[in-house]
Amino acid sequence: MSTTGSSVPDAGRPAPGYRVYRPVLPEVCPGDPALMVLTGDAGGRCEVFALDARTGRTRQVTDRPRGTLHCAIDADAAVWWFDEDETGRGHWLHQDFHGGPVRPGLTGLPAGTPRGLAVGAGGTVAVGLGDESGLTVHLGRRGGPGRPAVRTEGHAVLCGLSPDGRLLAVTRSASSDRAVTVHTASGETVAELSGRGGGLWALGFAPAAPAAPGSDGDGGAELLLVRQDGDRYRTATWRAGDGVRPHRWCAFDTEITARWYPRGRRILVRQDRRGRSLLFTADLDRQSLTPVPVPRGSVLDAVPRPDGDVHYLWTDTATPPHARSASGAPPPAAETPAVRVPGRHTELWTPGPDGDVHTLLSLPERPAVRPPLVMLVHGGPADHDRDAYDPTVHSLVASGFAVARVNYRGSTGYGPRWRAAYGQGVGLTQVADLVSVRADVLARGLADPGAVGLWGTSWGGYLVLLALGTRPGLWRAGVAVKPLADCATAHRTGTPALRALDEALFGGTPDQVPELYARSSPVHYAHRVRAPLLMAAALHDVKCPPEQVRTYLAALRASGVRHEEMWLDSGHDGYLGGDHVAVLRRALGFLDRELRGAGRTTGRDHDSPPRPGRGQDRPPAPAAGDRVDHERR
């Protein structure tokens, strides 16, 4: 979303002068590569569109009051989308590419959260639906009745269906004994693949493969995997009867993801490395790894084409995302806004106990005085800030603020050791990195030491609250959007995925290790907050539930801390452009007032050491392989 205006007429539409822009690569029909689906803007909402590359015609498929995000297209050119309510629960629906009646993906299924969709040959459909306690995978013919095939407790995701519809794969925590399980269509377990000793991820079955000689047909199904092996991430494959075959020649020092080419035993590997991206083609038969040239910056998505070309979505901090191709041919894509991102964009590395902390720094062009500094804190925790366009960075720099995006310990893109470096405790380790980078930026004379603020969303909002409470003298304002505020309450009221994440981070439940939850919980330090806070929360948030936000706000009120509240009638992952614009506008005004206006104070820092937590034991390092989609972001 590019930002050039200032007013918001209603909660569902962007303000005049603002433009909603969601950059994506279209999903391509396996049976006809000219037919595609994508999500884009429809009057301030995210909706699904069908694109015919032969004619250039685009048709809006969905029109829902709260927008639509999840979509797919199968080999028969059926367009799929997830019809969800404000809590994220619903059903998969489908329609012919050119229109016609809307039908359920499978009939007779209960409502649930989307945990995977796969369509095999002949219209065999596998639907993964989550509930309060686990995952159920339903199988059936497209549009027909579904039957439960696999049931598992705890958080799990359907990650693939073999082309012949005979095998399906389910992923759990990447570091668990059953990180990946393969089942028959009747629900029998074929293989249990362990992620102990690092992590194991499944990335889907090859689009098609001949059966292995002498097999009953299942031997042709090949499942793509990534395994963490010490300080490296390696690709691997699995076949029935052969087990897991690691490809030791295809190894990387930071996190990767991969996907199959439409034909042949080739995969496209995307590596996240130090805030930027690299692409490679790996030929599994020839055991060769070939770089795919991309400009310096970030690749947000990449898709191999049937003709061997690669389409990818590229950006850097100064350039909004847009589609490119490795061949140079223009790919079909939505219009890219012609936006000039102001400022000077650089980076710095700050020494730390587990290695140098990497920060992406954006500065106003030639400020007359040292500018106020906003530390924009990324979510996750297993994610990272990229050398990529960010509308919040754009808006802040255009308004005269300096912006620091810190890839603190626990961030992805810096290798397994960095990902697991939680030595000072959950959250407290990350706050220590924010404090170090703040000091580094100020020591270089790049910002005003009396005007430093924090802004974060989800896990980033959690770190904002924790930093305000544990190091109160360093900050002049904070903005927390849909944050984790009370760790124990969030565990009790959150989703199975997030309970599993919390237990991996803390080494147990709040009942088992209450002192560790308290030590890392912002509500425990709310009475120490000095800086004014803007809290933006969502009424239907299931990842960072409103109950635990209200607990934190009550603690602020009891201590007389100055704060503002903003409640959105949405869930955690809002699809309405107007909500994003409303938060952006409110936060910009708040920070302008507190860091530059009447609320600003000047002078040296008056920091005091954090109050000791009730427990001094350090929690174990997080599982380095837990998937990003398990997390709050």
Image (cartoon, grey):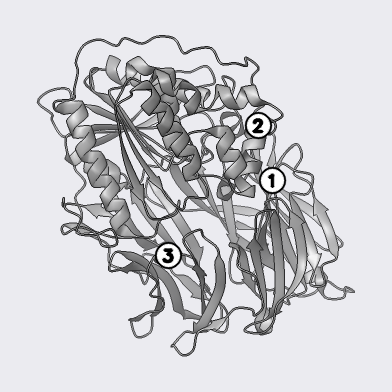
- Side (left or right) of 65 relative to 220: left
Depth check, mark 3 against mark 2: the one in front is 2
Q: Are marks 1 and 3 in contact (CB under 8 Å)?
A: no
Judge whether residue 252 can be spotted in this image. no
Pick whichever of labels 1 and 3 is earlier in the sequence: 3
Residue 23: x, y in percent?
36, 60
- The residue tagged 3 is 25
Could you give the CA–CA distance between mark 2 and mark 1, rounded to whole angstroms?
22 Å
Q: Amino acid at mark 1?
A: Ala
Q: Amino acid at mark 3?
A: Leu
Residue 51: x, y in percent?
39, 78
- The residue tagged 2 is 510
- The residue tagged 1 is 174
Q: Counting other residues with Cα less than 10 Å from the Cα at mark 1, is it few (<14), some (14-19), or many (20 or more)?
A: many
Q: Is residue 485 above or below residue 560?
A: below
Q: Specify the quadrant that holds the N terminus.
A: bottom left
Residue located at (30% from left, 21% from top): 441
- Side (left or right) of 475 relative to 381: left
Residue located at (87% from left, 75% from top): 216
- Side (left or right) of 177 relative to 514: right
Q: Counting other residues with Cα less than 10 Å from the Cα at mark 3, is it few (<14), some (14-19), or many (20 or more)?
A: many
Could you give the CA–CA distance between mark 1 and mark 3, rounded to whole angstroms?
27 Å
Determine the residue located farthest toward the left in the rendered image.
368
Residue located at (71% from left, 63% from top): 136
Pick whichever of labels 2 and 1 is earlier in the sequence: 1
Secondary structure of residue under mark 3? loop
- Side (left or right) of 603 relative to 420: left
Residue located at (58% from left, 44% from top): 493
Residue 368: x, y in percent?
9, 26
Residue 485: x, y in percent?
47, 34
Determine the residue located farthest toward the front in the rendered image.
558
